[in-house]
Amino acid sequence: MFPPNPKEIRISPDQLPFENESQDVILAVTALHEILDHEKRILFFKEAKRILKKEV
């Protein structure tokens, strides 16, 4: 959407605002390519692992 949506929520990809194992799925379709720094991208995936529910 252009211009950017004023209701857009911006968060730090290495500090996702969710509790451990609290999410069933993460949808980051148009976000990952914006994390240009390799180390920050790795931190995002670590955070994703932290907040995703464990498989049963």
Image (cartoon, rainbow, N blue to C red):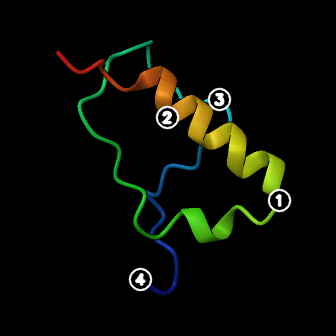
Q: Position of residue 3 (x, y in %)?
A: 51, 84
Discs 4, 3 touching: Cβ within 8 Å: no
Dot 4 amino acid type = Met
Counting residues from the start of the chain, the first of labels 3 and 2 encountered is 3
Discs 3, 1 touching: Cβ within 8 Å: no
Discs 3, 2 touching: Cβ within 8 Å: no
Can I make out residue 12 in this image?
Answer: no
Residue closest to the far front: 56
- Residue under label 2, please give it: 48
Numbered disc 1: secondary structure: loop
Counting residues from the start of the chain, the first of labels 4 and 3 encountered is 4
Numbered disc 2: secondary structure: helix
- Residue under label 3, please give it: 15
Dot 2 amino acid type = Ala
- Residue under label 1, please give it: 37
State the CA–CA distance, disc 3 to disc 1. 15 Å
Mark 4 or 2, closer to the camera: 2
- For the point 16% across and 15% down, the residue is 56
Discs 4, 2 touching: Cβ within 8 Å: no
Q: Position of residue 12 (x, y in %)?
A: 67, 41
Numbered disc 4: secondary structure: loop
